[in-house]
Amino acid sequence: MLKPILNQIGTKRVVLASGSPRRQELIQNIGLSNVQLCPSTFEENLDKTRYSFAEYVAETAYHKVLEVYRRLSGESTIDSSLRPDIVIGADTMVTMDGKMYGKPKTPEVAFQMLSELMGRQHIVYTGVVIKYHDREVKFTEACKVNFGKATAEQIQAYVDTGEPLDKAGGYGIQGIGGTFVEKIEGDYFTVVGLPLYRISAELCKMFDYRVEEN
């Protein structure tokens, strides 16, 4: 999808405001082979009561991007090669019954989260911000995920793998956690943490490549 604009983007310094090799690989898979990781130092301490779920992840992504852009732009006074052209950031949240499920800090919390999610439908929100110098776009994608049923023994066995501890909602759909997923309604990559179609579409718009609607 990005093929018509890759020559333009290829001359830019693209930074992903993340420390996740998984997200870096996803971005590389759509053609941005030169993307670099730069974890944000933003504390992610926004007041959750002030935002809807969709707004919260988008605003968190925005602060991640802004922190990275400003930091690297400041460092570019020493080394101009550090100045970013495009910074992309994302934040993902799992929700059910008005409750947010973040990254569990302990195996016990992971077990409790997964036990609540089993046999039910939850919603995953991923907020994304793309900053291209003074141009910015912010959006949120949502995907409904249905978990099948699982026994306490099966949940504990998954928790024991260690995979849930760095995943929103306590599971990774692209890993072993995907075996709990019965079906989804929406973009699979929203659940992974980087909605690739929407990101590609927004980048095309930024570089003035328009797809005519039927």
Image: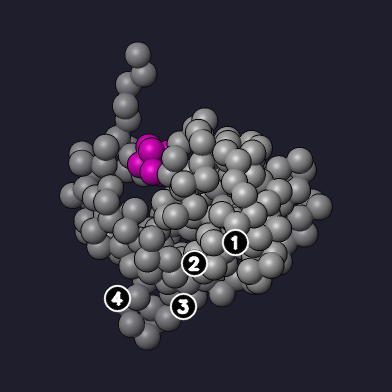
Q: CA distance from mark 4 to mark 1?
A: 47 Å
Disc 2 crowd rating (10 Å Cα; few below 14, some 14-19, many 20+) is: few
Disc 4 crowd rating (10 Å Cα; few below 14, some 14-19, many 20+) is: few
Q: Which residue is mark 4?
A: 81
Residue 60 vs residue 77: left or right?
A: right
Which dot, 1 or 3, sits closer to the camera? 1
Element type at mark 1: helix
Q: Which mark is residue 161?
A: 2
At x 66%, y 46%, the residue is: 117
Q: Which mark is residue 68?
A: none
Residue extent of the magenta highlight: 196-201
At x 44%, y 55%, the residue is: 176
Residue 211 vs residue 146: left or right?
A: left
Give the farthest residue toward the left: 7
Q: CA distance from mark 3 to mark 4?
A: 12 Å
Q: Which residue is mark 1?
A: 156
Q: Position of residue 1 (x, y in %)?
A: 27, 37
**Foreground pick, 139 / 125:** 125
CB under 8 Å between discs 1 and 3: no
Residue 113 visible in the snapshot: yes
Q: Which residue is mark 3?
A: 74
**Foreground pick, 181 / 138:** 181
Residue 77 counted in the magenta span: no
Q: Amino acid at mark 1?
A: Gln
Label whose residue precedes the other's in the sequence (1 or 3): 3
Q: CA distance from mark 1 to mark 3?
A: 46 Å
